[in-house]
Amino acid sequence: MSPAVPWGAAEVLAALPQTQCTRCGFPDCAGYAAAIARDDADINQCPPGGQEGVARLAQITGRPVKPLNPDHGNEGPRTLAVVDEDWCIGCTLCLKACPTDAILGSNKRMHTVIETHCTGCELCVPVCPVDCIDLALVHPGPTRPTGWAAWSPTLADHARQRYDRRRSRLEGGTPPHADAASGQSTPAANGSPKPSVIEAALAKARAQRVR
């Protein structure tokens, strides 16, 4: 479950994209929402939400619309993390950094990203000691939607559920994809990906390695 937030923060939290990228200056979207509700943070600190996100928060809080604060980053197209398996050393640092358990791997084994769970938060990129993680555009064509035009409430809800499950897992002391790494399937109810998703991700990673 998400941590308790002040009165009014729940509505603010529901309007955030749930990428958990920390660019707002807070450890997660819930922390930012709580700060907005306390009037300790401005409504223009969320680059993934973009200018439309600022407008949504302005409508909820009654504050005036203002430009996105560049100190927290710029609005841009949606991206996904991509691991270069030829360089991956299996250090697991990216697994620990990923807020939605979107990276599959184990110690000293090749890692790969489960695209359906990746929010493009970029938190895995700086922790990689061999710089084998890059970002790929979800929409690489000439039209590259940004902010909420590249995201959706459905994707945000999925990301929030993944993050909440990860928090519960960490509180319970269970490593990410523990059963998947050992070759056993894990029920989707505990937040781990379904076996079919795992198999597809691994198959894609193997295919990329032999090219």
Image (tube, rainbow, N blue to C red):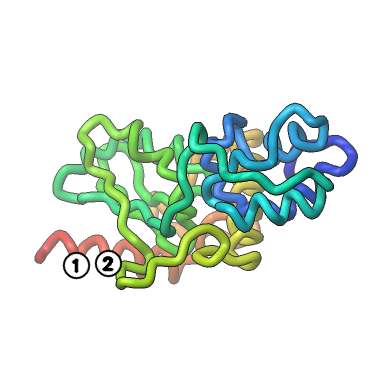
Q: Residue furthest top?
A: 40
Image point (81%, 52%), residue name: 60
Q: Choose between 71 and 195: the one closer to the eye.
A: 71
**What residue is at 75 percent from the left and 49 percent from the top?**
58
For the N terminus, the image quarter is top right
Please tell me which residue is depicted at 45% across the width and 35% down the height of the picture. Answer: 96
Front-most of 211 and 156?
Answer: 156
Q: Position of residue 185 (x, y in %)?
A: 48, 61
Residue marked by disc 1:
207
- Residue 206 versus residue 177 in the image, above or below: below
| Image coordinates for residue 103, horizontal then vertical, percent | 40, 50
Outermost residue toward the left in this view: 211
Do residues under tags 1 and 2 come within 8 Å of each other at their CB atoms?
yes
* Residue 128 % position (x, y): 30, 34
Q: What is the distance, in whole Å, between disc 1 and disc 2 at their CAs?
A: 5 Å
In which quadrant of the rendered view does residue 20 lie? top right
Q: Secondary structure at mark 1?
A: helix
| Badge 2 amino acid | Lys
The one nearer the camera, 15 or 30, is 15
Asked if residue 37 can be seen in this view, the reply is yes
Pointer 2: what residue? 204
Task: Identify the residue shown where x is 82% and y is 30%.
Answer: 38
Question: Does residue 157 sit above or below 48 in this rendering?
Answer: below
* Amino acid of disc 1: Ala
Label number found at residue 133: none
Image spot of residue 2 (x, y percent)? 73, 43
Local SS, label 2: helix
